[in-house]
Image (cartoon, grey):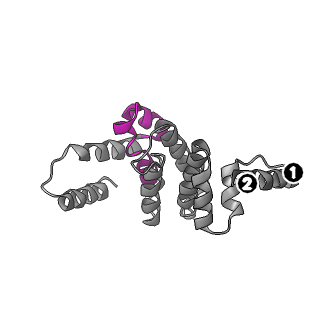
Amino acid sequence: VEKLASEKFTLARDRTASRAPVAKFIVLYFQTRADADAAARDLPRRLREQHQWHAGYRRLAAKLGYLNDEQRAKIDRAFEFGARAHKGQTRASGQPYISHPTAVAAIVAELRLDAESICAALLHDVIEDTQMNADQIRQEFGDDVANIVVGVSKLDQLNFTSRGEAQVESFRKMMLAM
């Protein structure tokens, strides 16, 4: 797969003078998601992580058409901030950690919430799981985003008798925060 991708990438680069990463090219080259996923599994880890980050962010970006350019730029910055903060962290599935906040942000975007809510979704685990703090988020993204992130981070401190009760309370607090 790497040899085929390398040959096709070289041809595409020669035709378009593009310097796109091999992982991105493979996603464009293979027509079905199954083929792209199979190819991605065979790539070196660094390229596989790039493929997953870009795929998740592309799904999110496709849902942001209702926002203006300035709001989308703020969301881009939040994604980059979160990706840098979570760099090197992976989920139990082996995916880069940023895939979870990106999926949460996509759900928030499907609900057509504002840019601040989407930024908070992208950053919701940054305070708990990285060296970043609320002041850094506040400085970069403002009080609204920082307050939502801090509020969501405090949800983990609550104790519940069942998982269902915890999910209901998390949803209720998220709605109140927004």
Q: Which residues are magenta?
A: 116-142
Q: Residue furthest left?
A: 161
The residue depicted at 70 percent of the width and 49 percent of the height is 22
Relative vertical location of residue 28 with respect to residue 17 in this rendering, above or below: below
Residue 171 appears at what percent x and percent y? Answer: 28, 59
Whole-percent x, y for residue 31 in the image: 67, 68
Secondary structure beneath disc 1? helix
Callout 2 crowding tier (Cα within 10 Å): few <14, some 14–19, many ≥20: some
Front residue of this view, candidates 108 and 177: 108
Amino acid type of the residue that numbered disc 2 sits on in the rendered structure: Ala
Residue 134 visible to an observer of this rendering: yes
Instruction: Identify the residue shown where x is 40% and y is 34%.
Output: 130
Q: Which residue is mark 1?
A: 14
Say if the magenta span includes residue 127: yes
Looking at the rendered structure, the kind of residue marked 1 is: Asp
Q: Is residue 40 left or right of residue 98?
A: right
- Residue under label 2, please give it: 5
* Number of the front mark, 1 or 2: 2
Q: Is residue 145 magenta?
A: no
Q: At 26% across and 43% down in the image, what residue appears?
A: 154
* Depth order, front residue of 30/75: 30
* Residue at horizontal 47 percent and vertical 41 percent from the top: 141
